[in-house]
Image (cartoon, rainbow, N blue to C red):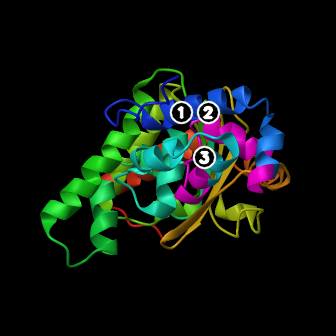
Amino acid sequence: MAGPKDLDPSSSPRALLGAELRHAREKADLSQEELGQRLFVSGSFIGQLEAGTRRMLPEYARMLDEVLGTEDFFARNCGAAAKSKYPDHFAEAVEAEAIATTIRHYLPLLIPGLLQTPRYAAALFRTYRPTVPDAEIDELVATRMERARLLNDPTTPLLWVVLDEATLRRPVGGTATMAEALRHVAGLASRHRIIVQVLPFAAGAHAGMGGSLKLMEFADAPPLCFVEGLDMGKLLDDPATVARNALTFSLLQAAALSPQDSLALIESVAQDYEHGEQHP
């Protein structure tokens, strides 16, 4: 019998690789947990590889070939599935985000990338990279706007965002850019495409003071949590860790303004920016 063929990089290589992994695992009569034990990972991790929500790294590909008797199929093809235009620490999260059914995101200082306008994104990228050519900034902005297209679907994913009030008050790119950015967020909320809550300064200390977090749920794979810092990030799949971060997000929701009051505040601050007013 002929062995499996190389994956076509022009298709969906991660999905195809996941399907081949499921086929090979079932042919070997192994459960996800049993295969995970042989690779020293969790069964949920194997499930995420099969569902295409996790990237197959070369070291796992080599071990899978050995355990499943697939010669060098996974090692040979994992490179196509790993190609990404995003930084390594962020690529997995973006690819998981694209197939998530629900995304819950808290950011303490910035409007999330999925909700940014081109001018807001450009101001951020220029701040991070003050000396690069304009063409590079334009390319980064285009990539971010392409990622935001997943919101073109009218219902999926469900996106629930909690913004710290500091996000509204810091004039990234100036007052005109902020007015446009906040009007964009308010418009998505008004059209019921997203749910937005603002965590006000008056809430005082809160559960998310340690940093940002993103929770993602999927139709056919366990949930994931992504936490990030400056030029670093980590995708977490441990059920206890994901549950703990889900509780953190629930506490943030409880401390935040209602969606209605949040929308009113966002629109009010946007109007102030339109009048050229700065915020403390």
Dots 1, 3 in contact, CB < 8 A:
no
- Residue drawn at x 34%, y 37% is 9
Q: Position of residue 158 (x, y in %)?
A: 59, 30
The residue that disc 3 covers is: 65
Q: Which mark sits nearer the N-terminus, 1 or 2?
A: 2
- Residue drawn at x 65%, y 49% is 66
- Residue drawn at x 44%, y 44% is 77
Quick one: 150 or 270, which is closer to the camera?
150
Q: Which mark sits nearer the N-terminus, 3 or 2?
A: 2
- Residue drawn at x 77%, y 54% is 245
Amino acid type for the residue under numbered disc 2? Ala
Q: Which region shows up in magenta?
A: 38-62
Q: Which mark sits nearer the N-terminus, 1 or 3?
A: 3
**Residue 195 higher or lower than 213, as above or below:** above
Is label 1 or label 2 in front?
2
The residue that disc 1 covers is: 99
For label 2, the SS is helix
For label 1, the SS is loop
What is the total number of numbered labels drawn onto the structure image?
3
Q: Residues within 10 Å of mark 1 (few under 14, many from 20)?
A: some
Dots 1, 2 in contact, CB < 8 A:
yes
Can the viewer see residue 10 in this picture? yes
146 relative to 256 in the view: left or right: left
